[in-house]
Image: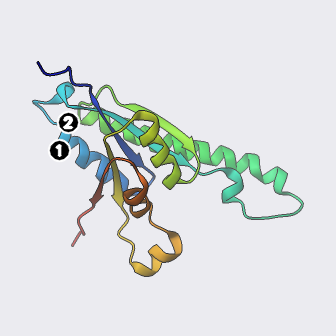
């Protein structure tokens, strides 16, 4: 007799880019579409990595103490907008049981830690489509996760618009 299968977890990383919005929509269209609906084999966890105010403000010296609360407030508002957009997408795709998390830190580490925390079997990230030079300077979250995450990593690439 087969053992009772546990529901698998899919972590989807999002930011404020069109690339991650596309990846989230693509994921729902391909894994959570009717007639599957709520019978999908995956529980979905949507994760947004919010940078810390100190990582954004690279100034040193007098006045930084006054700037940090303003930057932190803006980062929280931005994170709320990102999660709000993700919730709208969930509603439009009839996904009602998604879990949403905002975690402070570098997206590479936040996503790999979310995979471990939730025992995810799949991590979905969007590709910004950076060239080799930009990728060398900025780093690639998807590349890092593909090599470091302890699960299958699906990199969703947004089609180029004509």
Q: Are marks 2 and 1 in contact (CB under 8 Å)?
A: yes
Secondary structure under tag 2 reads loop
Most extreme residue toward the bottom is: 133
- The residue under the point 40% across, 39% down is 46
Nearest the viewer among 90 and 55 is 55
Q: Is residue 86 left or right of residue 68?
A: left
Nearest the viewer among 25 and 146 is 146
Q: CA distance from mark 2 to mark 1?
A: 6 Å
Residue located beneath label 2 in the image: 32
Most extreme residue toward the front is: 1
Q: Is residue 79 left or right of residue 74?
A: left
Q: Is residue 152 left or right of residue 14?
A: left
Secondary structure under tag 1 reads helix
- The residue under the point 87% across, 63% down is 61
- The residue under the point 20% across, 36% down is 32
Residue 111 at x, y percent in the picture = 46, 47
Classify residue 128 by image quadrant.
bottom left
Mark count: 2
User: How many residues crowd around disc 1 within 10 Å: few (fewer than 14), some, or many (20 or more)?
Assistant: few
Against 13, residue 98 (above or below) is above
Q: Is residue 52 left or right of residue 93?
A: right
Residue located beneath label 1 in the image: 30
Residue 51 at x, y percent in the picture = 60, 51
Residue 93 at x, y percent in the picture = 23, 36
User: How many residues crowd around disc 2 within 10 Å: few (fewer than 14), some, or many (20 or more)?
Assistant: many
Nearest the viewer among 147 and 53 is 147
Q: Quadrant of the C terminus?
A: bottom left
Most extreme residue toward the right is: 62
């Amino acid at each position: 007799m087969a053992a009772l299968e546990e529901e698998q977890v899919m972590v989807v990383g999002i930011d404020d880019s069109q690339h991650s919005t596309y990846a989230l929509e693509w994921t729902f269209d391909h894994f959570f579409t009717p007639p599957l609906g709520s019978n999908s084999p995956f529980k979905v966890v949507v994760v947004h990595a919010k940078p810390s105010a100190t990582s954004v403000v690279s100034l040193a010296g007098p006045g930084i103490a006054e700037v940090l609360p303003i930057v932190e407030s803006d980062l929280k508002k931005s994170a709320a907008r990102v999660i709000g957009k993700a919730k709208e997408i969930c509603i439009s795709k009839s996904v009602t049981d998604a879990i949403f998390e905002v975690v402070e830190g570098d997206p590479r580490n936040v996503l790999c830690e979310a995979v471990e925390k939730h025992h995810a079997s799949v991590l979905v990230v969007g590709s910004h489509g950076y060239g080799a030079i930009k990728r060398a300077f900025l780093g690639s979250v998807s590349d890092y996760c593909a090599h470091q995450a302890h699960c299958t990593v699906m990199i969703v690439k947004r089609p180029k618009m004509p």
